[in-house]
Image (spheres, rainbow, N blue to C red):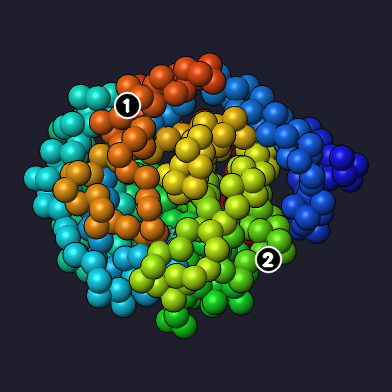
Amino acid sequence: MAERARELIQVLVEGKPLSKAEYLQVLTEADEQDREFAAECANRARIAQFGDGIFIRGLVEFTNVCKNDCLYCGIRRSNQDIVRYRLTQQQILECLEQGYAAGFRTLVLQGGEDSYFTDDRMCEIVAAVKTCHPDVAVTLSLGERSYDSYRRLREAGADRYLLRHETAVEWHYAKLHPPAQRLETRLECLRNLKALGYQVGCGMMVGSPYQTAECLAADLSFIQTFKPQMVGLGPFIPHHATPFAKEPAGGVEMTLLLLSLVRLTLPNVLLPATTALATLHPKGRLMGILSGANVIMPNLSPISQRDNYALYDNKANTGAEAAEGLATLSRELETIQCHIVIGRGDAPIDTSSPNTIQ
Ligand code: SAM
């Protein structure tokens, strides 16, 4: 047991912040016992905030067309070896109906940065979802758009927005993206989303190429300051048709430690146990929950298109991560004394959160 790492985890448990250097110490010094301690504390914090309920979000991956060329991503513009697709509004609404009948009350619309989906088209889709089911929360994950675009989407009814910051370190961001994509732009988008009143999610991949423990400490420090309502974090997994094809995947243990540290840093955050984690380990989802996660995002996309939204190789998409597998998921959750919550599952309102990044 590393005493200093244990002490620092305890500081988080007591609701106090850590410096970047302290996060780094936890990340580099924590041994297996400390990681278990962090997971136990994070699991307790999850239960204190949310009881034994796990929120589900229905994920619709509605386009894999993307103008960006992120070096890690399987749907990057340069990948010529995939079948590109777009769902129609009608198809998206069909996914919604199936999800609604199954109990989903949050629809997550995620896609590449596809210029076909203009503000007019996206606003129409969001408004149509809200007209069909006013009790459904709409989460968008469409990448970087202008303040005005985010404003229009919010006015059309969008409630939440997921935009992982990917890494809080500029040189690392530049290793993962072409020069045209800049960390500052991404952060500006996050600030705009918060200012517009969205429930905002940032996050990063764990074990992405060139990432150091210092990068992850900077990510945690950023999350602590920004206070997002959601954090999406999962392991990096290589995709065969990207420049990072030969890079190793991120570690399950490190991902679990980060989930725990995020839960302890922001006790009421909405924190998914990601499909990427379930892809790397058959029990990844449950391990994620026992480390502090409280959200699962089963896939509601049409089965015929799921293979085409391949961000990384071997993506889990037939078991409990699929919306059809809700009964399986429910049984899996019972084994760890958890159950699925039918409801929007909004972030608790934290009046102490500043609405902008300092
Ligand atoms: N275009 C939107 C955006 O930029 O936020 C949403 C889609 S993007 C594909 C969603 C997330 O997938 C990214 O934020 C990234 O963290 C994750 N992702 C992409 N490639 C990945 C990989 N090889 N391994 C794990 N996660 C990956």
Contact flag, marks 1 and 2 (Cβ < 8 Å): no
Asked if the beta carbon under badge 2 is closer than 8 A to the nearest atom of ligand 1, the reply is no
Q: Quadrant of the N terminus?
A: top right
Marking on residue 194? none
Which residue has dot 2 on it?
212
Furthest residue to the right?
3
> What residue do we see at 20% from left, 36% from top?
96
- Asked whether residue 309 appears in the rendered view, the answer is yes
Q: Quadrant of the C terminus?
A: bottom right
Furthest residue to the bottom?
179
- Asked whether residue 13 appears in the rendered view, the answer is no
- The quarter holding residue 245 reads bottom left
Q: Amino acid at mark 2?
A: Thr
Measured as percent of width and height from the top left, residue 247 is found at: 53, 68
Q: Amino acid at mark 1?
A: Leu
Q: CA distance from mark 1 to mark 2?
A: 37 Å
> What residue do we see at 53% from left, 53% from top?
235
Q: Is residue 10 above or below residue 247?
A: above
Picture quarter with ligand 1: bottom left
Furthest residue to the left?
90
- Quick one: SS at disc 1? helix
Measured as percent of width and height from the top left, residue 313 is found at: 38, 58
- Quick one: SS at disc 2? loop
- The quarter holding residue 167 reads bottom right
Residue 336 or residue 174, whichever sits in front = 336
Q: Is residue 11 left or right of residue 176?
A: right
Which residue has dot 1 on it?
326
